[in-house]
Amino acid sequence: MARAKKAPPEKSGARTKHWRALDAAHHIHPFTQTEALNREGVRVITRGKGVYLWDSDGKKMIDGMSGLWCVQLGYGNKELARAGCNALNTLPFYNHFFKTTNPWTAELAAMLAKLLPDGHEHVLFANSGSEGNDTALKLIRYYWNLKGRPEKKLHLSRTLSYHGVTMASASLSGLTPMHTQFDLPLAGFAKVPAPYWFGAKAAGFGDIGPEEFGLLIARETEKIIRDIGPDRIASFSAEPIQGAGGLILPPSTYWPEIARICKENDILLHADEVITGFGRTGEWFGSTTYGIEPDIITMAKGLSSGYQPIAAVSLGERMGEAIATAKEELVHGFTYSGHPVACAVALKNLELLQRQRIVQRVKKRIGPYFQRRVKEVFSNHPLIGEVRGIGMLAAMELVEDKAGRRMFAPQRNAGIICRDHCFNNGLIMRAIRDTMVLAPPLVITEDEVELLLKRAKLCIDLTAHDLGVG
Ligand code: PXG
């Protein structure tokens, strides 16, 4: 323990050892088996610039995941740093509880209202996607209470969805490994199937096409709603594209049918745009990409390019009207809701996304380029069963048998083998089960896309070799 108090040593090897030891002794990591990590030794990330990260041994990596799907503007953006620094020097903290606001919070709320889909004129702030979703669920309950429909309490969401880790957000999440350790989900949550077409064959749906599958899953959702009784259902929460569940792109038939079902059954539609917001799909919001008209939207991550922890929840017309005109106090809010430094950084981030026309660039130039090149490089690869993507999101399914769309048995660890090759070869690519996912910063250049794909190809070749495919 005495070692922990010493200043970091000068030499990089010794410094890495020093930080590893401190981390192993005192830091419990998220979604990590602590004992295994400490045996292996953690990687210490010390610096970022553009699309690159460096570790404490000076190893440079290209970040194909924008941190955790969030660094839209890349690392080391000086304007974002200056905006945060300016707020820190001017008003490092004040709250909004005592009939007060601050310039950055007010401007950010107005800027969001301008960028959000029509009707979303009101926002509340939180500090993470999980808190944002927790807030959204509370507001959904409140809305139905205000409307005299207190029996509408059940929250629907999808299998393989990721909505965060608080008690409510984890209950909303459909990734079942998130539940068992904590006796979740709480009461009042129910699941409907995800429109995961690539997994349809393995799930016993046979050789169904994506469009037919999208309809089938929406109709299955409708059946579950009918069985539960629409009068009991408050909301349907969904990511426009499921991110952490495996980059599941909905077939084109899915969302229009879900919108109809929600409307007909008077169920509030809650879009979780934590990953799909702020240009990721080539529009400001994934809801626009898929023609979804949500009653309530959660956003975080790209809102500040991840430079500050901040989330927002926006209310569409009917929820905004009911909540903003209620004749009573809204008994909700965090110490740091609308934190001035986080708001200043988010505001600057939105200004830069607009000034540099980054969302249009994703839609018109770099997004189509990225999609075309990922498909060119991987569509015919024997280890890749499907390449899918939109904007600056791409997924590649590692399969044992390409023609038969047969996946690997989980114990083959295909995804983990590939991810480890990536780390060792200067690329950060996420493995979700055996789906390899890329979500690079929106500012990535064509040359950087080429470098990223060159490394990804090398790593997928190495993985194919390890697994004896091709
Ligand atoms: N909604 C969505 C759609 C998310 O992707 C959250 C809510 C929760 O946000 P916070 O800020 O509370 O983490 C997320 C977060 C991964 C990974 O490995 C993805 C997330 C978080 C951590 C890891 O893909 N998404």
Image: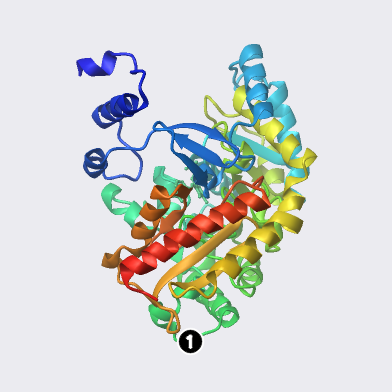
| Towards the viewer: 451 or 76 | 451
Q: Is residue 2 left or right of residue 260?
A: left
The quarter of the rendered structure image containing the N terminus is top left
The answer to which quarter of the image holds residue 206 is: bottom left
Indicate whether 219 appears above or below 308: below
How is the structure coloured here?
Answer: rainbow
Taking the view exactly as shown, the residue that stands out farthest to the bottom is 207
What is the three-letter code of the residue carrying label 1? Asp
**Percent x, y for residue 118?**
77, 51
The quarter of the rendered structure image containing the C terminus is bottom left
Indicate whether 327 appears above or below 159: above
**Percent x, y for residue 122?**
70, 40
Kindly identify the residue that appears in the image at 61 percent across and 49 percent down: 448
The reply to whether residue 292 is visible in this rendering is no
Indicate whether 319 appears above or below 467: above
The answer to which quarter of the image holds residue 74 is: top right
In this rendering, the count of numbered labels is 1
Q: Is mark 1 within 8 Å of ligand 1?
A: no
Q: Crowdedness of circle 1 by 10 Å Cα count: few (<14), some, many (20+)?
A: few
**Percent x, y for residue 229?**
49, 68
- Disc 1 designates what residue? 207
Kindly identify the residue that appears in the image at 49 percent across and 66 percent down: 396
Kindly identify the residue that appears in the image at 53 percent across and 75 percent down: 380
| Towards the viewer: 280 or 340 | 280
The reply to whether residue 324 is visible in this rendering is yes
Indicate whether 461 appears above or below 163: below
Where disc 1 sits, the SS reads: loop
**Percent x, y for residue 323?**
66, 41
